[in-house]
Image (tube, rainbow, N blue to C red):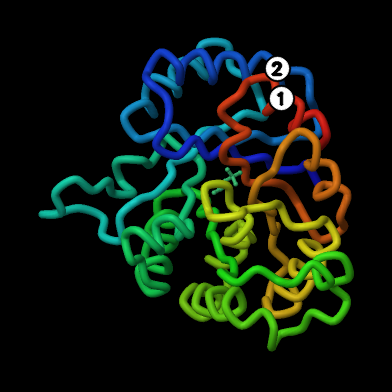
Amino acid sequence: MRSLIVANWKMNTTLSEALILANGVKEGVAALPDVSVVLCPPFPWLVAVAEALHRHPAKHIHLGAQNLFWKAEGAYTGEVGAPMLAGLVQYAIVGHSERRRHFHETDQEIVAKAKLALAHKIVPIICIGELKKPTAAVLADPSELNAATLRQPLHELAAVANGLTHEELEKVVIAYEPVWAISGNKDAVAATGLYANQVAEILLEHLPVPLPVLYGGSVTATNAREFLAQPHISGLLVGGASLKIGEFVKICRQA
Ligand code: PGA
C-alpha cells in the first residue's frame, strides 16, 4: 500500500507562504509514485491552496482540513461544518491532541466529527495518543508494552471503534501521536520506530477491522525512515517539518 504522509501546518503561514509551500511540495513530490500526500493548511487558505493544486493537478496530492465542527450547520459562531468542506477537502484531522487540550474536545465530539466527515465523503484522520512519556528503557525495548500500559490511546481508540459503525470505521485513518513526542511540548522527542510499531500493533489488535495507522510526533527528514520501515506503520503525520519544502519533500521521498 502507498504510504500516507500528512502535513499539518497548524496555525502557521500567511497566504503567500501557504501558496509557495503548496506549489513547492507539489513539484517536489510529483515524481514519487509510492506516496500519497495530504496538505492541511489553515482554513482561510483552503480554497487558494485547492486552486493551486488543481492548476497542474498532481495525482497523489490531496487537501485536508485541520478540524471540523461536530454539528453540520447552525448557530455556532466561528465554526466550520462538514458540508462546507465537502468537495473541497478529501481528509480532515479529527481529535488532534492540541484540540483535545486547548479546546477540551471530548471523545464523544470526536466521534460526531468523524461521522459528519464520513457522511460528506471526507476521510477522518483520528488522532490518539498518551500524555505520559515512557522510560528510555521502554522506548529502546518496547516488547513489554501491553494494554495496561497503553490505557489512554486504547481508551480513545475504543471510543472511536464503539461510536462508529463497522462500515464507517473501515474508512477511517488512525494517527498515533504520543503527546509527549509532539514538538512544542516540553522536552518533546520523537518516539523510536520500534516503540511506535509496537503500539500500532497493539492498537490494531484492538480494532475489529484493519486500519492504516500513521505515526506523528517530531518527525523529521532524519528519522522518517525509521518509522516508515515499520510493518504496522502506514504513514506519517508531520507538523513542524511540513513547513519547510525541502525537508518535507525529503520525508516524502523516504516513503
Ligand atoms: P510535530 O507535530 O511534527 O511538529 O511534532 C505533529 C502533530 O502535532 O501533528
**Residue 249: which numbered mark, if any?**
1
Kindly identify the amino acid type of the residue bearing the numbered disc 2. Answer: Gly
Residue shown at 61% from the left, 14% from the top: 24
Give residue 248's position: percent from left, percent from top: 67, 28
**Residue 9: which numbered mark, if any?**
none
Residue shown at 45% from the left, 60% from the top: 95
Note whether 42 is above or below 26 in the view shown.
below
Cβ–Cβ below 8 Å for labels 2 and 1? yes
Give the quarter of the image for residue 43: top left
Within 8 Å: ligand 1 and the Cβ of disc 1?
no
Most extreme residue toward the front is 187
Note whether 178 is above or below 106 in the view shown.
above
Secondary structure beneath dot 1 equals helix
Give residue 96's position: percent from left, percent from top: 48, 56
Give residue 82's position: percent from left, percent from top: 33, 49
State which quarter of the image contains the C terminus.
top right
Q: Is residue 174 visible?
A: no
C-alpha gap between disc 2 and disc 1: 6 Å
Q: Residues within 10 Å of mark 2 (few under 14, many from 20)?
A: some
**Residue 28: which numbered mark, if any?**
2
Kindly identify the amino acid type of the residue bearing the numbered disc 1. Answer: Val
Residue shown at 35% from the left, 50% from the top: 68
Residue shown at 80% from the left, 36% from the top: 222
Q: Residues within 10 Å of mark 1 (few under 14, many from 20)?
A: many
Note whether 142 is above or below 216 in the view shown.
below
Mark 2 or mark 1: whose residue is earlier in sequence:
2
Q: Is residue 141 visible?
A: yes
Name the foreground residue: 189 vs 164: 189
Give the quarter of the image for residue 119: bottom left
Secondary structure beneath dot 2 equals helix
Give residue 184's position: percent from left, percent from top: 52, 47
